[in-house]
C-alpha cells in the first residue's frame, strides 16, 4: 500500500468516515507509518494516532498546500536571480 502524503496541518478523514482530523504530529524522516491527529468532538479536544494508510486527505486542503509550495518555490527562484 502506498504511504499517504500527510504533513502537520493537513486535514484528513478516516477512510471509513468520521469527523475531519488535523494532523498534529508527524515524523516522516523517521519513516513513521503513523501520524498523530486531533479533532474537536463537540465538547472537548480529542487526539489519537492512526496509520497513514487509514486516512484520506481532504482534496481541497491538498490542492491549497501544493499551490503554496509552488508559490514558495517561485519566490525562492526570484530571490536567487
Image: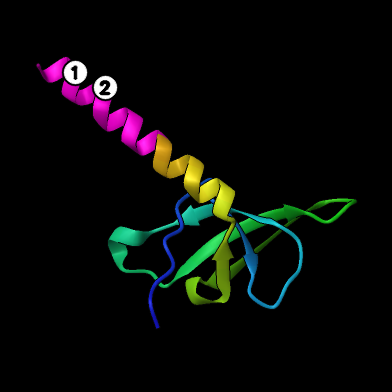
13, above or below 40, in the image = below
Residue 59 coordinates in the image, percent (x, y): 56, 55
Q: Quadrant of residue 2?
A: bottom left
> Mark 2–mark 1 contact, CB under 8 Å?
yes
11, above or below 64, in the image = below
Residue identifier under label 1: 78
Identify which residue, 20 or 68, lies in the foreground.
68
- Residue 81 left/right relative to 20: left
Q: Quadrant of residue 68?
A: top left
Residue identifier under label 2: 75
The residue at the point 73 percent across, 72 percent down is 17
Give the number of marks.
2
Distance between mark 2 and mark 1 Cα atoms: 5 Å
64, above or below 6, in the image = above
The residue at the point 56 percent across, 76 percent down is 54
Bounds of the magenta span? 68-81
- Looking at the rendered image, the quarter that the N terminus falls into is bottom left
Amino acid at each position: 500500500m502506498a504511504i499517504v502524503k500527510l504533513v502537520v496541518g493537513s486535514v484528513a478523514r478516516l477512510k471509513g468516515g468520521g469527523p475531519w482530523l488535523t494532523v498534529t504530529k508527524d515524523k516522516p524522516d523517521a519513516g513513521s507509518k503513523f501520524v498523530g491527529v486531533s479533532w474537536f468532538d463537540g465538547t472537548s479536544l480529542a487526539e489519537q494516532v492512526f496509520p497513514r494508510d487509514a486516512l484520506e486527505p481532504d482534496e481541497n486542503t491538498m490542492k491549497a498546500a501544493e499551490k503554496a509550495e509552488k508559490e514558495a518555490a517561485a519566490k525562492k527562484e526570484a530571490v536567487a536571480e
